Image (cartoon, rainbow, N blue to C red):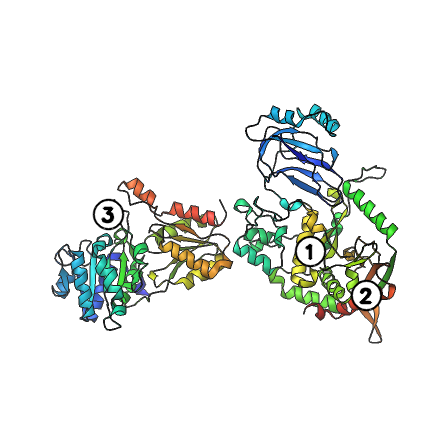
Amino acid sequence: MAIEIKMPRLSDTMEAGTLVKWYVKEGEQVESGQVLADIETDKATMEMPTYDAGKVAKIMLKAGANVAVGETVLILAEEGETVEAAIKSVGTGSSPTSEAKSEASAADSSKEPESSPTTTTATASATPTSNVASSSNGTTGRMLISPLARRIAEENGLDLKLITGSGPQGRIIKRDVLAALGQDEEPEQASTNPPLSTLSQMVASPSTHLGDKIALSNMRQTIAKRLVESKNTIPHYQVSVSVNADLLLDLRSTLNEQLASQNVKLSVNDFLVRACALAIHLHPSFNAAWKGDSLQIGEHVNIGVAVALPEERGGGLVVATLRDADRKGLRQISAETKALAEKARGKGLSLEEMSDSTFTISNLGMYEVDFFTAIINPPNAAILAVGAAMKKPVVRNDELTIGHEMSCTLSCDHRIIDGASGARFLSTLKGMLENPATLLV
Amino acid sequence: MAVASRQIQYREALREAMSEEMRRDKRVFLMGEEVAQYQGAYKVSQGMLEEFGDKRVIDTPISENGFAGLGIGAAMMGLRPIIEFMSWSFSLVAADQILNNAPKMLYMSGGQFACPIVFRGNDGAGGQLGSTHSWTVEGLFANVPGLRIAIPSTPYDAKGLLKTAIRCNDPVFFLESERMLGNKGPVPEEEYLIPFGVADIKRTGKDCTLVSFGRPVHFCLEAAEKLAEEGIECEVIDGRTIRPLDIDTIVESVKKTNYCVVVDQSWPFGSVASEVATQVYERAMDYLDNRVFRVCSDDVPAPYSKVLEQAMLPNPGKIIKAVKQAMYLE
């Protein structure tokens, strides 16, 4: 029997997907686990693997076509089956996809995929339907990793799921982990991966001109939909506090100096992630989700970090999830955030890496922003907007002096958190950031 | 140091070790086929009959089982025999004596009889001698508790290890190589001994650890030179003795390089290389970025054909390939 490959549901909210690129062409033999195409969903561009082996009998859609979840996008001929028999057995008239099909079949005979496949490694992590195979290597679902690579990753708190292995059968080896950590094997060639602070270089975009009309990408549509929904349904209010960042900045530079040889470079944001995670423990309602008739206090403290995407990839914004951030040290938070941010700006995050945040931080400190407010990322109860730690004339010990002040503005869902609770949370947070030793031990 | 510049052959180093120990200790004597009148089948004992006389340099009939047993009896009664096998291949007819008696004597006699004896001779293939005369016995004999195995790769190590072997109170299997007897190397004139169980790092490097014993150490050094031209710096560890095994030095190196290739001229199944690999796994698992690679003789009897025999043995080409595979370079 022919195998029909249908548009998969790659995210909870996905209704339709756009075929960005085919990696296979008609007549090609494909293996189970091989990536067939890139699909753009409402959240991200993801790889679509096949779970069956066979010969590609027919590609039903051109690159760029947008179809609903469940519609046939490709027909595979099984072993021993001819391409013609496979196409015939699927039938052509009754399917709701006939329009797309006829359109495609008119074009597909002459249309070659725009580029030849560059990789056949299955990236199972992109599909929510695969529960076990969340590793990025191998087709068996087992993560292959050398003992050394595993140890280095563990010591640095690196999530192995974020790493693509370059060894045999996709085994993750030392160089892959070092690359993910931003360390080169040769210290003299140490790569200088852009830290968060160089995001500003990505703002200037020559690709957009005054007077342009721009089609909405799926991501832009999703951002629009979700934020309008957030603003329309969540009664937002803001509370602001100014944090004395002197000790925090001192501590950060001391740690970075002493850990430089281990390639640890902590950002202010890493401290914020840690502080928020710990503060949530003291204020559990900040981990809640509004359920209409009840509140669900999240079991895990998963901190979302907003990451701006480079303009050349269409811009936009994703929220990377640092899972169980309350159970992670600064080093691990730093390494994971760095890896996630890099992946977000590069090949893109998997659904898992963007899901399940319970509290979000939006930090525009790298743009020297003094103060701003953020829109809650549903179903979170709150979001923290953080400005730059800037030199200001301040009063310390009843004397006017120069100090570093950083604004923290909390947007809360008033259905869940009242004003005084928001103020208490900020007070806890301010206490931790102004006495940063509490974040270390 | 003027003495260090003296270059002598591997066979001369062996002779010096035996002669010095025989001068030092009247209980030491040499016995074997052609060791006396013929001056040694491979001229290792040249001149020794003249110096020490026929009571201490003794020709035997072609009867390994007989003279090996004679030596064991002499050792049990307080002498310190050196038994020369023309080839370790011929020791197999004396297997009961050398494996079933010598290494167990101290244990079975409840400490009443030690067995301070040295069995020495040529080990290894490479001379077109055919299957039965081309044994590399280290894999086979290393399995036996109660004995020591020394396997020097240079004249310096040969002399220092043989002197230690002669003074050792346990039976020592001393594995030489006909292919190396003519090799020259620096050997000081003053006395020195090399303790057992201390490996020698013959070349330092940071990228991959090569562990070997005996003749293949030279193949490793040759491979390391070629790899260095490609920027790969191998650390070459010469174990020098197989029992005891200096696993600490090996593990320390593997912790530094994260990659390990063991080169061993015995057959792969249950080989010395297998043992080294296992001990590396036991002690340095979390430092390995890949499995340990073994380069052994192929799992066939040694062929007579020159071409096939060379193809069967470890060589620099095989080692280079193994290093590159271990380091994920091919």
Decide: marks 1, 2 in contact (CB < 8 A)?
no
Residue for badge 3: B132
Calculate the distance from the C-alpha at mark 2 to the C-alpha at mark 3: 85 Å
The location of residue A171, given as percent across then percent down, is 54, 48
Left of B102 or right of it: where is A32? Answer: right
**Total marks placed:** 3
Q: Position of residue A249 (x, y in %)?
A: 73, 66
Quarter of the image holding residue A197? Answer: bottom right
Question: Where residue A3 is drawn, which disc sits there?
Answer: none
Q: Is residue A251 above or below residue A159?
A: below
Task: Give the amino acid type for the residue marked by disc 3 in the picture.
Answer: Thr
In the foreground, B17 or A377: A377
**Chain for disc number 1:** A
At label 1, which amino acid type do we have?
Thr
Residue for badge 1:
A337
Side of A113 relative to A207 (left or right): left
How far apart marks 1 and 2 lie (CA) works out to: 23 Å
Q: Residue at x 42, y 64 (%)?
A: B248
Q: Quadrant of the N terminus of chain A?
A: top right
Q: Which residue is mark 2?
A: A426
